Image: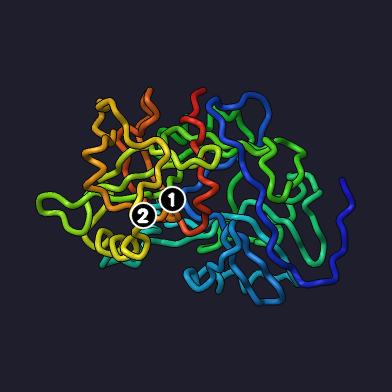
Amino acid sequence: MKLSRLKRTPADYIEPMKALGMTQVPTGQWHCEIKFDGYRAVAVLNGGRVELWSRTHKPMGPDYPEIVRALAAVKCRSAVLDGEVVALDAQGRSRFQLLQGRDLEEGERPVIAYYVFDLMQHNGRDVTGWPIEERKKLLASLLGKPKRPVQLSATFDVEPADLMQAVCQQGLEGIIAKRPQSIYETGRRSGAWVKCKWLGEQEFVIGGFTPPQNSRQHFGALLIGYFQAKKFMYAGKVGTGFNRALLESLHAIFLKRVRTSCPFANLPMVARRRFGTGMNAAEMKKVTWLRPDLVAQIRFAEWTRDGLLRQPVFLGLREDKRAADVRREASPATA
């Protein structure tokens, strides 16, 4: 084990490690965990004072006071935790839509939880150089018997394909597989952690919207895309996943970002697309263009051969991702 370094200064934000997307479920020995469908969050604890940060170092504490209160009760001098803030449905599954809509919907609010899966600093010690097994052991000891809203993310030492099959059956998003003995590589996507999804879901950037039709108000569909070699590439239209309150709130946000020109580098498209997500010059005249800086979470069936999304569904906005960092990710994984 690498000797930890003693830190005299208080604990502070540490950029989280990233997982590499895979189209094939890995084989062999891995430590496997459930992939949560929420917001990545770094918790900084200093003698009962708690800060909760997004992966892009934006404050999250005011949005999740129940998590801050629970973390304040953790007994330690200082610590930095890595985890995911999620909203749980009636079956206990994390659902990103519930996070997005909890302040817009009437009635019962969803259960909020913070699943912790790693530890980067503890009582003045930098433990990022420790093997993952030792970090997890210390983390479990630190949290004690977890109770909501703070939970320890379970580790399954099984074949990744077996856990992936169970995840598919239960309607979860996917798995994270971590190499045994791996260290915590701050801010890196080295491949020591890999993520596998059984369905298509990723972030896209909003570049415009079409006018509403029939009884719908505010807007019809969103035009979304991703960045490729600094070019903003069109990936299709998404017109489902909205309720009345969400349409109204999003439209108010959009009106502050209106621009006169199309931001997509690959529009217009000449050929008519089979699934109706293409965009020719005539259709473009109806679009209200937006500054491409809003990130949305989108679920979809697949990528078509011409690089567009099939059956996309809007899940919510993401404030924890930079628009410039959004790329086309790996397709859903297969065993």
Label 2 CA crowd tier, 10 Å (few <14, some 14–19, many 20+): many
Q: Quadrant of the N terminus?
A: top right
Q: Is residue 22 left or right of residue 317?
A: right
Q: Residue at x 70, y 59 (%)?
A: 14
Q: Looking at the picture, tell me which residue is in the foreground, 260 or 23.
A: 260
Q: Amino acid at mark 1?
A: Ser
- Please name whichever residue, 298 or 85, is drawn nearer the observer in this view of the structure: 298
Q: Mark 2 sits on what residue?
A: 290
Q: Quadrant of residue 156?
A: top right
What's under tag 2, amino acid-wise?
Leu
Please tell me whether mark 2 or mark 1 is closer to you in this view: 2
Is 316 situated above or below 26?
Answer: below
- Alpha carbons under labels 2 and 1: distance apart: 30 Å
Q: Which mark is residue 165?
A: none
> Which residue does the image show at 78% across and 44% down from the upper left?
131
Residue 181 against residue 144 in the figure, above or below: above
Front in this rendered view, residue 217 or 120 = 217
Residue reaching furthest to the right? 3
Considering only vertical position in the picture, is 202 above or below 253? above
Q: Eyeballing the image, is 65 above or below 326?
A: below
**Residue 30, position in %: x, y?**
66, 33
- Classed neighbour count for the residue bearing mark 1: other residues with Cα under 10 Å, few (<14), some (14–19), many (≥20): many
Residue 212 picture location, percent across and down: 17, 52
Residue 59's x, y, as percent?
56, 68
Residue that mark 1 sits on: 94
Q: Secondary structure at mark 2?
A: strand
